[in-house]
Image (cartoon, rainbow, N blue to C red):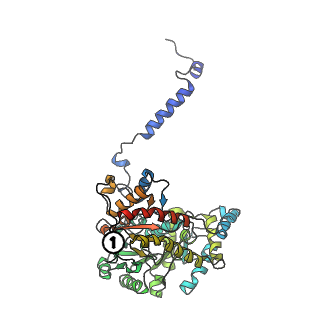
Amino acid sequence: MTFPTLSSLLFRRPLVAPAAASTATSLTRRAFHNTPLKMSAKLKPAARVSGRRQDVWSIINEAAAASPKQPIVNMGQGFFGYNPPDFILNAAKQALDKVDCNQYSPTRGRPRLKQAISDAYAPHWGRKLNPDTEITITTGANEGMLSAFMAFIEEGDEVIIFEPFFDQYISNIEMPGGKIVYVPMHPPKEGGTKTLSAAEWTIDFDELERAITPKTKMLVLNTPHNPVGKVYSREELQKIADLCLKNQIIILSDEVYDRLFYVPFTRIATLSPEVEKITLTVGSAGKNFYATGWRVGWLMGPPDLIQYVAAAHTRICYSSVSPLQEACAIGFEQAEKENFWSTCVTDMQAKMRRFNAIWDELGLPYSEPEGGYFVMANLAKVTLPDGYPFPPHVADRQRDFKLAWFLIQELGVAAIPPSEFYTDENAHIVADYLRFAVCKDDKILEEAKERLRGLKKYIQQ
């Protein structure tokens, strides 16, 4: 028997030409990677991320991609349609030239930003917060809230949230094993026939009190509210605070729209020293400075609470992006000088008036926002055509999902169905509403209005 020599093995001519062999290998690899892996129980994903139904964002994106009305006018997602002002953009560009701004920041945040936040919030707090012990910087407000839940929620602890809620609250609470207890906000009874203030969306405080148990650890508050646009009154906040003090419940106050309020705005932490001791307040540079992609947020609160939020944040992402922290610090330092905050309010109110004129024209009621940049329009008068071809995953949802799909397909305008922000049990409450984001360029608002005029033939008076 003759065995091949080493040289013959090394230099043997391939059976397939190199290019063909490479292509064949590539196709084989692609086929392997595209073949779904049969998962044993050991390889299955955790329950916290598996088994969820298709979310509103993917449904709306799917509808937009399938619509014959292109390009879609996106009034759905709450990102700004314009840049931050030059003084903030220039601060970000200049920060990139600083060596220390391109390296790790302290886990609790850059000292300059924490000091700038302390100075900026002092007029609202009545005192300066200690930047070292009462403020921590996070990678966006969402990560800050996750850090708060990770810091205080353990398996079986209950967290009260009001419906409609920001959808990220749910997974953030469930990650550490928390149990969510829902309390619905109720829209005005005449909301389908009359334009009323967002203040008319109310909480039944008897319902809230019944939701509290010995296991209730936290309550999440959002004011100004997304998507309703409600700014909780001082009296409402006091009732919530009294219940939380009585039952020793931590308040997590999501105040990311805290520079966009059109009626008097009270920060719940400022009601009394006692309330301040149980309150964590969430802020967002993305919302403040028209830069949602920057992912710079913060939490403010008493040292006894903040130290544990900071500890959780350190474990989650260690520290947050350095150059943009520096830019936000400069943004806060210069905002008053640039008359930025008052301009924000004036500009957003003008956008609200510009866009909401279409509902007045069509005779469709809406909730007049008290804060933020969302408006909830009631489309109960809009009749959807019989037999309209909704896909099964839309046909099975509340009417607002059908309305959203219909608007995208027929008019090319995207809005968000707010029943996504309610439990199935309470989703019917907002079945006739859609949420529109007005933080867009005026040309986009005008284009949206022109397209929405196409609703006229579907409106029953």
Looking at the image, the residue that sits furthest to the top is 1
Question: What SS does tag 1 mark?
Answer: strand
| Relative depth, front residue between 267 and 378 | 378
Q: Tell me the residue at 43%/86% (across/down).
A: 234
Where residue 404 appears, as percent x and y from the top left, is: 39, 61
Q: Tell me the residue at 48%/70% (across/down).
A: 355
Up-down relation of residue 411 to residue 128 (above or below): above
Where residue 320 appears, as percent x and y from the top left, is: 57, 65
Up-down relation of residue 15 to residue 139 (above or below): above
Residue position for label 1:
182
Where residue 12 appears, as percent x and y from the top left, is: 57, 20
Where residue 197 appears, as percent x and y from the top left, is: 41, 79
| Relative depth, front residue between 1 and 371 | 371
Horizontal placement of 394 versus 7: left or right? left
Mark 1 Cα-neighbour bin, 10 Å: few <14, some 14–19, many ≥20: some
Q: Tell me the residue at 53%/27% (across/down).
A: 21
Up-down relation of residue 221 to residue 27 (above or below): below
Looking at numbered disc 1 in the image, what kind of residue is underneath it? Tyr
